[in-house]
Each structure stands twice: as C-alpha cells, then as structure tokens.
Amino acid sequence: MTSVRNRLPPLSGNRWLFFVGIAILAAACSPKVRPASTSVKTENPIAEKEAEKTAEKSVAARASAISMLLPFNLDNLNAGMQYTPATLANANMSLDYYHGFKLALDSLTSHGYNYKLQVYDTKGQPSEARNLAYTPAIRTSNLIVGPVFPDDLQAFTSVLAGTGKVIPTVSPLSPASPSTVKDADLVTVATPLEYHAWAIAQFIADHYKPQKVFILKSGFSEENNFIVPLKKGIDSLSKHKIRVITPTIIRGQLNGLIPQLSFTDENIIVIPATNQPFLMVTLHSLDTLAKKYPITLFGHPSWAKFTYLKPDILQRLKTHITATDRVDYKSPAVIAFIRNYRKIYHAEPSHYALMGFDEGMYFGSLLGENTDGLKKLDKNNFSGLLNQYRFVKKPGLGWVNTHVNILQYNNFELRKIE
C-alpha cells in the first residue's frame, strides 16, 4: 500500500481531478472491496434475486487476495517534485485502469464474492518492481495484476519465480510478446502482434487463396516482428503453395511490382510499416496502381490509431486491419458501465478504464467462483465490453490471449467482418 502527502505540487491545466483521485486511492485503499451502490445490474430479475440470496449467505466468505502493481509515480506528489508529461500519462493510465478494475470487483460482490485488493506503486522502474517482488503480502496473493511495462514485469517475475510459488501474474495492458518475460505463470491479456499476423495469414488463406502475397517493407528492423510470423503462417496454412514476395520499397516506387501483378485476380498486399512518411507516399502510389489492378491491402493494427491516414484511400484499397478491442456504445452493458463510472468517479471512462473493468470482471469471477479456474483459462472464454479472451497455454510462456478481429474500411469507417 502507499501513502501520499496532503501537500500537492503546482498544477498546469485542469488535471486537479487526477490528483484528487490519487489522494483518494492512497488514503482510502481498503483491503476489502465492498459492494458499490451502483453495481452493474443484470437484466434477469430471477438472477438478481438469487444473487441477493447468495450475497446474504456469503457475508463471511473467503477473501481472494489481489495485488495490483501500477506506475502511479506517487513520489511526484511530494514537495519539490512534479510530474512530467510522460509520468503524468502513466499515472492517469494507472488510475483509470484501477477505477475500472475496482468497479468490476464492486459489481461482483453482489454475488457474494469477497476480495482483498492491495495496490502498489511500481513508479515505472524495474528496480522498484523487483523490490516489490519480495513483499510478503504480494507473495501470498491469489492473483497479481501488473507490472505494466515489459521491463518492470521481467524484473518482477524473475524474483517471484525463485520462490517456487505458482501465482498467476497478469500482464494487463502490454501486447509485448510473453517471450520477453518467459514466465510460466504469466497471463498476457493484450493479444501479441504475432497473433495479429497469424490472423491475417489465416484470413488470406481462407478467403483469397492467392498465388502470391506481397509484403512491402520500409527497411526498419522492427517490422520483422510482424513479417516473420506472417510469413510462417502463410507458409504453414498454404503448405508453401502461396509465394511470399518481400520487396523493400523506397520513396513509393512500385514499378518493380507491376510485372508481377494480375489484371484479373485480387493482388494481396501487406504493409507492416508504422512509419508516417513511408505510409503516406507508399499508400498514394498503391492508390494509383489500384486504378488498373485489383488490390486488397492488409495493414498493421496500429493503423487504426493513425489519424493522418486518409479513409478514402484506405477504402479504395479495400484495406483490412486487425484489432482486439471494439466498443459498442449502444450496448446496454456499455451504457450501464459509463453511467456508473460517471456517477462514482465524476469522469468519463477511458480506454484503460474499460480494460480494467473487463479484466476485473473476468479474473474476479474466476477467483470468486473457484481459484482453480485460473488454472483452466482455455476453458473460460470471455466477451467483455471492450475485448474478448481466448487463452491458450504456451509452454514456458504462460497463458496468451489469441483473440483477433478482422476489420475492413466500409463507408469510410472500420467495420468488423470477422
């Protein structure tokens, strides 16, 4: 647990609500999560009555201990200290995630479940995360959530692994490959990039069965994190019947591709780049080619966040992008969550708040029902407000969420097609 001084440093802008939230978190963090008056309601009246009966009978139910490790950077609240834009962003992320997670646990207590939520500040530093791994209260938890960043997580689990205890440790936000941590008790919730690549390979093989797939490279080495699993997936699924061509494109020059393109069959193009100048010029060149050749484009999942990409060009190129999180703001469950979140926290829920709520509902339910459920995540699929969980067990790497959606530009917006 952590505490902060009452004295706050000078603020810029209107972020005082954040500091109030941090102060409330530090001062009021309670080991026991009690039911909130605005718990998420079920639409089934029979289920509501049963839940109330269960809650009455379970007042003395066992408490599931959850340790949460997030980069609040509370030291910056001390006199003479100040948040930087980066540390403030991390702290905002942490507070939003915590709020969403706790709202989920508050909702679950209506079913008679009981939780002991312990919150720790990693300060975004591997050394601090490593020190926290020696904390007795953390070592006796039923579930650990965090640290957030891969380096912090690796430092933390390297110590925890030496205890010989099996405690599921959730990587709550990072899609980094679990191979960077290499912990058998790790649970990676955000689908790693390699599974996005495999989903594209599967979609291409199932829907197009092309003779060739062109992967246009910009030359940056990090693109291999996408290219290698994509090529491996295409080779495996097609039994090497699909030829993968990987030219490096310079200044949008695509003349070398023209002799290999088809006038009649769909030409499948994959661009794993995230570099803005490269994308701007290359997509413009592809758009020109698409006037003569049928082209279907597949892009990096990060493209969904790039506002500089022009929807009209992406639509003409029949662009597909993978994603794991989609929110239906017309859904009654989402509407109820937003209403409850506003009422309790007097703020709008962010992407991280939704992630926290989904993860709180999923892991809280498994803990509340039976801690053995954490050993069988592949038997417990989940559809949340933001994401879906389809876990597989990878030897030496723990549990990995493999769920991926395929989206396509239609009417100038991304829409789910698979």
Image (spheres, rainbow, N blue to C red):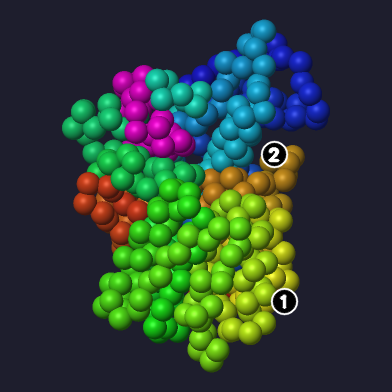
Circle 1: element type: loop
**Quadrant of the rendered structure where residue 296 is?**
bottom right
| Residue 153 belongs to magenta span | yes
- Compared to residue 290, the image places residue 183 above or below, namely above
Asked if residue 149 can be seen in this view, the reply is: yes
Q: Position of residue 225 (x, y in %)?
A: 40, 53
Query: Residue sitting at 59 percent across and 65 percent down?
Result: 253
- Compared to residue 181, the image places residue 47 above or below, namely below
| Whole-number angstrom distance, CA of label 2 to CA of label 1 | 36 Å
Q: Position of residue 97 (x, y in %)?
A: 56, 41
| Residue 53 belongs to magenta span | no
> For mark 2, does the 10 Å Cα neighbourhood hold few (<14), some (14 to 19), or many (20 or more) residues?
some
Type of the residue with mark 2: Tyr
Mark closest to the chain's N terminus, 2 or 1: 2
Question: What range of the chain is rendered magenta?
Answer: 129-155
Q: Position of residue 201 (x, y in %)?
A: 40, 71
Q: Nearer the viewer, residue 14 or 346?
A: 14
Side of 192 where 93 appears, left or right = right
Q: Nearer the viewer, residue 87 or 140?
A: 87
Query: Residue sitting at 60 percent across and 45 percent down?
Result: 353
Look at mark 1 in the image and give the residue it sits on.
411
Q: Nearer the viewer, residue 402 or 32?
A: 402
Q: Nearer the viewer, residue 302 or 4?
A: 302
> For mark 1, does the 10 Å Cα neighbourhood hold few (<14), some (14 to 19), or many (20 or more) residues?
few
- Compared to residue 209, the image places residue 299 above or below, namely above
- Counting labels gives 2
* Residue that extends furthest to the left in the rendered view of this protein: 164
Look at mark 2 in the image and give the residue it sits on.
345
Type of the residue with mark 1: Asn
Side of 267 where 346 appears, left or right = right
Query: Residue sitting at 30 percent across and 28 percent down?
Result: 139
Q: Position of residue 293 (x, y in %)?
A: 59, 84
